[in-house]
Amino acid sequence: MQHIADTLAQQGFVVIDNFFGDWKILKQEAEELAQNNAFRPALIGQGDAQQHNITQRGDNIFWLENDKFSPTQKAFFDKIDTLQSFLNQSFFWGTNDIEMHFAIYHQNMFYQKHLDNFKNKNTRRLSFILYLNENWLPEHGGELRIFSNKNENDYTNIQPTGGRLACFVSAEIWHEVLPTSVPRYSLTGWLRRN
């Protein structure tokens, strides 16, 4: 875990392959929820200003609730909770909450460049994304693009390969999801400070 903290401190984001071995079970759970029409279009904005705007954000999401976790969701939550404790010791963030949702980007969907914190709100300290995609190919698109704070033309593309975890500092790292040519699954969440 020290490598995660060191890399976050140096560049604001880190990518860990094979972070969670049971990611295929999570993918199956997400697919079952999708078959049961449990996903809803993701919104942008906050409070009364929330809106569905497919020109900015095209994913569908299903929020996970702690008291309704499946055993595999609980195992992933526990692993993230351990990471949260370590990062709180490393950075004195004081995060005390974890929120998570499944996300699906259907064909040609994307999420334009943004930060993961609302204006005048700094409750999210770390964003994390566990990818749930088997046999992902470069031609499928759907990469997470992380921009350098120093140069907008300097960015890193991260393929959404199954079992891979991408983490970044929520209030500092601008990012986007590039259009995908096939359905793209993930479990996305945040370490929060209430």
Image: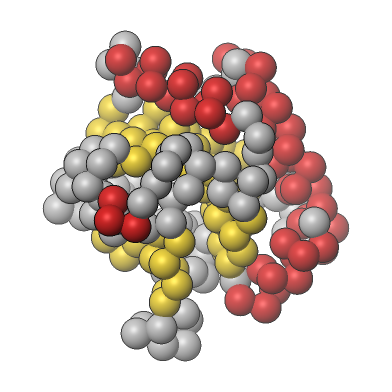
- Give the left or right position of residue 192, taking residue 81 as reference: left
- Give the left or right position of residue 86, taking residue 125 as reference: right
- Give the left or right position of residue 15, taking residue 174 as reference: right
95 shown above or below 36: below
Q: Residue at x 42, y 77 (%)?
A: 155
Q: Residue at x 59, y 60 (%)?
A: 15
106 shown above or below 138: above
Q: Quadrant of the C terminus?
A: top right
* The one of 109 and 44 positioned closer to us in this rendering: 109
* The one of 33 and 27 positioned closer to us in this rendering: 27
Q: Residue at x 31, y 11 (%)?
A: 36
Residue 131 visible somewhere in the drawing: yes
- Give the left or right position of residue 107, taking residue 90 as reference: left
Q: Quadrant of the N terminus?
A: bottom right
Q: Residue at x 61, y 76 (%)?
A: 11
Position in image of residue 6 (x %, y %) = 75, 71
Specify the farthest residue to the left: 55
* The one of 127 and 156 positioned closer to us in this rendering: 156
* The one of 126 and 37 positioned closer to us in this rendering: 37
Position in image of residue 183 (x %, y %) = 29, 37
Label tally: 0
Position in image of residue 26 (x %, y %) = 53, 26
Residue 175 visible somewhere in the drawing: no
73 shown above or below 149: above
Position in image of residue 74 (x %, y %) = 67, 24
Query: Which picture quadrant has residue 87?
Result: bottom right
